[in-house]
């Protein structure tokens, strides 16, 4: 199992947070890509040792609470860091234009990061991964948690993050889809192992749409760089 990070930064202060994490006794594999005022960093690392975990400040408790969720289900949708960013999060009726994302456009940067994977003692799979792609006019990120408990259920928690050049905000959509195996009896079992295929057959249980408003100075800088 590996421990990995994906960050999307538009200030040096955000990179500093990642650098601090990287300095605790292990080597990193990094890919950087600059996109206007943004810097995309994909970092892949081995799992942290116990002593390294104790040195790192974390909002998450270090003590194991029992009984715990043995499926490792999470609704994590990313962390906004950097007080100077002043990103405002608001509910919105605006949706990510998925049809626009399907249009053919040059992919300037792409990476996929596996955050964790567990076979649930051979009773299925629990996995969370991140995919990021950057185009000339936008970037799109998909954080997906996929759970399959054999003979019981399939669950997918998706976080989609989208930003277009020239706009002073990002859109973040979080959804939970879940169905029991009995509810999927008419769906070919071969699809059960493919999150992309089975997702459209699962029942939507929860949907939250947010607008992440960026500081005005970031928009002005982005527009200037596009014009130049």
Image: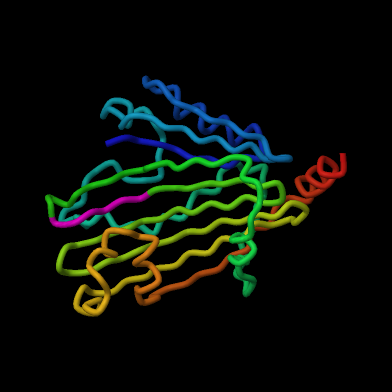
Give, as a single range, the part of the protein colored magenta: 123-128
Q: Is residue 179 magenta?
A: no
Quadrant of the frame with the N terminus: top left
Q: Residue, x 53% and y 64% (percent of image)? A: 173
The scheme the figure's colours follow is rainbow
Position of residue 181 measured from the top left corner of the image (x, y, whole percent):
21, 73
Compared with 225, 164 (above or below) is below
Q: What is the quadrant of residue 146 in the picture?
A: bottom left
6 relative to 156 in the view: left or right: right
Viewer-side residue, 57 vs 110: 110
* Left or right of 42 on screen, residue 152: left
Q: Position of residue 224 (x, y in %)?
A: 85, 43
Q: Which residue is more in the foreground, 91 or 45?
A: 45
Is 172 left or right of 183, judged from the image as shown? Answer: right
Viewer-nearest residue: 42 or 182: 182
Q: Position of residue 137 (x, y in %)?
A: 71, 51
133 over 32 or under it: above or below: below
Considering only vertical position in the picture, is 115 above or below 147? above
Q: Residue at x 12, y 50 (%)?
A: 121
């Amino acid at each position: 199992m590996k421990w990995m990070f994906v960050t999307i930064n538009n200030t040096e202060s955000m990179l500093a947070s990642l650098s601090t994490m990287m300095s605790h006794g292990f080597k990193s594999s990094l890919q950087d890509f600059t996109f206007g005022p943004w810097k995309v960093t994909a970092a892949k690392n081995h799992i942290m040792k116990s002593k390294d975990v104790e040195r790192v400040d974390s909002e998450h408790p270090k003590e194991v609470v029992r009984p715990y969720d043995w499926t490792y289900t999470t609704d994590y949708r990313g962390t906004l860091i950097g007080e100077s960013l002043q990103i405002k999060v608001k509910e919105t009726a605006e949706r990510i234009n998925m049809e626009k994302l399907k249009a053919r456009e040059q992919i300037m940067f792409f990476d996929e990061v596996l955050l964790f994977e567990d076979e649930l003692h051979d009773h299925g799979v629990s996995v969370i991964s991140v995919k990021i792609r950057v185009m000339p006019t936008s970037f799109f990120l998909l954080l997906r948690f996929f759970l399959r408990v054999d003979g019981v259920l399939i669950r997918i928690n998706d976080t989609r993050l989208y930003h277009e050049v020239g706009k002073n905000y990002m859109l973040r959509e979080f959804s939970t889809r879940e169905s029991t195996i009995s509810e999927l009896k008419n769906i070919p079992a071969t699809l059960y192992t493919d999150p992309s295929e089975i997702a459209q057959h699962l029942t939507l249980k929860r949907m939250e749409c947010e607008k992440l408003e960026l500081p005005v100075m970031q928009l002005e800088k982005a527009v200037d760089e596009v014009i130049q």
